[in-house]
Image (cartoon, rainbow, N blue to C red):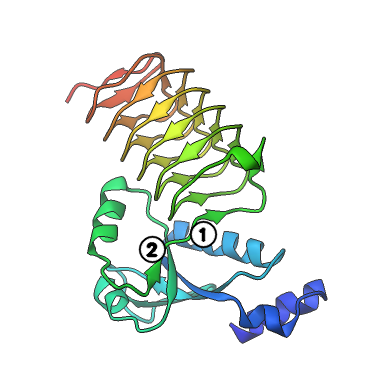
Amino acid sequence: MVCERSRINRATGTMLFNEFRDMKDIAIYGFGGFGREIASIILSINSIQPEWNIVGFFDDGVAVGAENRYGSVLGGIEVLNQHTEELDVVFAIASPVIVQRLVLTITNPKISFPTILAPTVLFFDRETFRYGKGNVLCHNVRISCDVTLGDFNLLNGGVSLGHDVKMGSYNMLQPETRISGETVVGNANFFGVRSLVLQGIKIGNDTRIGTGSVVMRKTKDGMTYFGNPAKILAP
């Protein structure tokens, strides 16, 4: 990471040694393609204001030492729970069930979960935006006024949240999902690519919305919806 810091320093000409010293160590949980996307977002944040030093990846299904351009796999959950230094961790996993299980399994008090905001996130009124820990907002997300997020929500590229949206925790929104104003979203829901929820609808818990689906009425917990208008998909 010394080489990466030096490269950013030469590119900007404005970063000081003390700024590098204050950077926090961060690891990405998930070594796949989404992990690389998260790493690139972190580097784009650092190019504006140095915040994190990427120390590597954790993954329970990939061999220790496997490498990509952003770092190598350090281990799985057991290694993370034995980590002795302060460490920020961000999840690069688009499964509410898996993320919930990992959060419950991580018992190391040295681990923290920052919210990652890509530099290109568009806030209509940032002062009215409220959020918890462990959220990830990718490039070109749009957040209207008076929006509230809980913890560990993933908003992929181009997602749009309308005014007064209230969202719980562990929700996964795939690219270009649109949640209209005054919608209330519960916990552990999955929204497929380019899905749309109309204004004022209530989405409960553990619901899956298919790709391109349009939700026009309140959903039932634990159901899968697909189509325009979205209907319950028969088992």
Picture layout, residue 29 above or below residue 221: below
Q: Which residue is mark 1?
A: 38
Q: Could you tell me which secondary element the residue under label 2 belongs to?
A: loop
The x and y percentages for residue 206 are 26, 35
* Residue toward you, 227 or 57: 57
Q: Residue visible at 46% across and 56% down? A: 34
Q: Which residue is mark 2?
A: 30
Name the quadrant of the N terminus.
bottom right
Q: Amino acid at mark 1?
A: Ile
Picture layout, residue 198 above or below residue 12: above
The x and y percentages for residue 166 are 44, 32
Residue 72: image quadrant is bottom left
Q: Could you tell me which secondary element the residue under label 1 belongs to?
A: helix
| Marks 2 and 1 close (CB-CB < 8 Å) | yes
* Residue toward you, 230 or 179: 179
* Residue toward you, 38 or 111: 111
Q: Residue visible at 62% across and 66% down? A: 43
CA gap between label 2 and label 1 equals: 10 Å
Picture layout, residue 125 above or below residue 14: above
